[in-house]
Image (cartoon, helix red, strand yellow):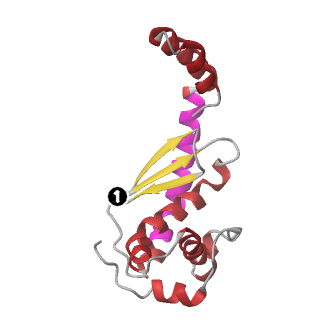
Amino acid sequence: MPKFYTETYQKNKNNKKLFAKDLNIKLNRIYNKNGYRLKIDKLKNSWQKIEKKVFDILDSFNFKIKNKYICHISRYGPEGQFKYPNIVNLRINNKDIKNANETIAHEIIHLLIYNKAKKLKLNYRQTEGMVDLFFAETELKSIFPKYKLQKIGIHNKKLFQKITKIKNSPK
């Protein structure tokens, strides 16, 4: 949520019409539809250049890759997020756009290992570590040579070997 949302709500909470009008005015100040469209187009073009190679690499791990992944774009929220089975949420602002492909690939890996991580009862830190290791230990490193391992992640290479060998269970 934009920072001004709470302030606008508090100011107009007793008048829904005024709240909606005030919020709309403030959103229109920061949301430039043409600028947003240009960023989305740039992002699409950039992803399309590497998409096949990313999926070819991931397919070598015998994952159940979906025919379609949906990517929702926002100016707010975390840099990337996923919702099983096939949704990626991506924040794009001026700082995020340069890492967008990396973020998309990162979230898709989360989706691909979701059932395996669940089966192994991996916690958040272990799961992040597993996702990171795909960028460090596979050919993804040739596409994303500047990927930085997350400090929060537990990077257990033995566990990584295990997770890349378990057949993906349905649930």
**In this rendering, would 142 be left or right of 115?**
right
Inspect this view and state whether residue 171 appears.
Answer: yes
Q: Quadrant of residue 132?
A: bottom right
| Residue 155 percent across, percent down from the top left | 63, 80
In the image, residue 74 lies at what x, y percent?
53, 40
Residue 85 found in image quarter: bottom left
Q: Is residue 161 magenta?
A: no
The answer to whether 162 is drawn above or below residue 155 in the figure is below
Magenta span: chief secondary structure: helix
Q: Residue at x 38, y 78 (%)?
A: 119
Which of the pair 89/13 is nearer the observer? 13
Quadrant where the N terminus sits is top right
Q: Where does label 1 land, which residue?
A: 68
Q: Residues within 10 Å of mark 1 (few under 14, many from 20)?
A: few
- Residue at 48 percent of width and 68 percent of height: 109
Question: Which one is nearer the viewer's eye here, 50 or 7?
Answer: 7
Residue 130 image point, x, y percent = 55, 76
Residue at x 50%, y 69% (from the top left corner): 54
Q: Is residue 65 left or right of residue 46?
A: left
| Residue name at image x 40 percent, y 77 percent | 116
Three-letter amino acid code at the position of disc 1: Lys
Does the magenta portion include 38? yes
| In the depicted structure, whether residue 79 falls above or below residue 153 | above
Magenta stretch? 34-55
Instruction: Give the x, y percent position of residue 153.
Output: 63, 72
Q: Is residue 165 above or below residue 155?
A: below
Confirm whether residue 31 shows in the render. Answer: no
> Could you tell me which secondary element the residue under label 1 belongs to?
loop
Query: Does residue 16 appear left or right of residue 80 in this picture?
Result: left
> Which quadrant holds the C terminus?
bottom left
Q: How many marks?
A: 1
